[in-house]
Amino acid sequence: GIIAYLQPEITFNPYKGIQPAFNRRSNDTEFRVGLSLIKRDINVWGFSPELRYTFVKNHSSIDFYDYDRHLVEIGVSRRF
């Protein structure tokens, strides 16, 4: 079968210093959701294939630092 793993995260990043280009402080909030799919019934030397997808949205008090990011990773996983 397939094992699915979902991991949500929220990170708050208040910066102390002022950004000279914008003459203000940046306060960022990062929202991250990761999904891993592992196919455990395929097993080669103890390793199983894994597909990971991560979506990141950064919201900043300075619009220039707002971004969305998509990340796809293919790898292997081992159960201990």
Image (tube, grey):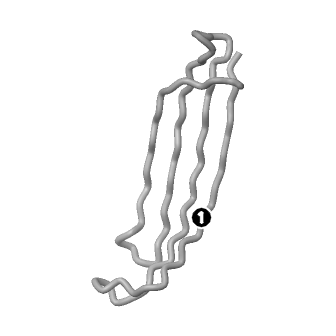
Q: For the N terminus, which image quadrant?
A: top right
Residue 7 quadrant: top right
Residue at x 59%, y 48% (from the top left corner) = 33
Describe the element under mark 1 as helix, strand or loop: strand
Residue furthest to the bottom: 23
Residue furthest to the left: 21
Task: Locate residue 51, reporting x and y percent.
Answer: 54, 28
Task: Locate residue 58, reporting x and y percent.
Answer: 48, 63
Task: Locate residue 53, reporting x and y percent.
Answer: 52, 37
Residue 23 quadrant: bottom left
Q: For the C terminus, which image quadrant?
A: top right
Residue type at tag 1 = Thr
Residue at x 54%, y 72% (from the top left corner) = 13
Residue at x 47%, y 72% (from the top left corner) = 60
Q: Sort mark 1 into few (<14), some (14-19) or many (20+) by Cα contacts within 10 Å.
A: few
Residue at x 49%, y 68% (from the top left corner) = 59
The residue identified by callout 1 is 11
The mark tally for this picture is 1
Task: Locate residue 11, reporting x and y percent.
Answer: 59, 64
Q: Is residue 17 left or right of residue 10?
A: left
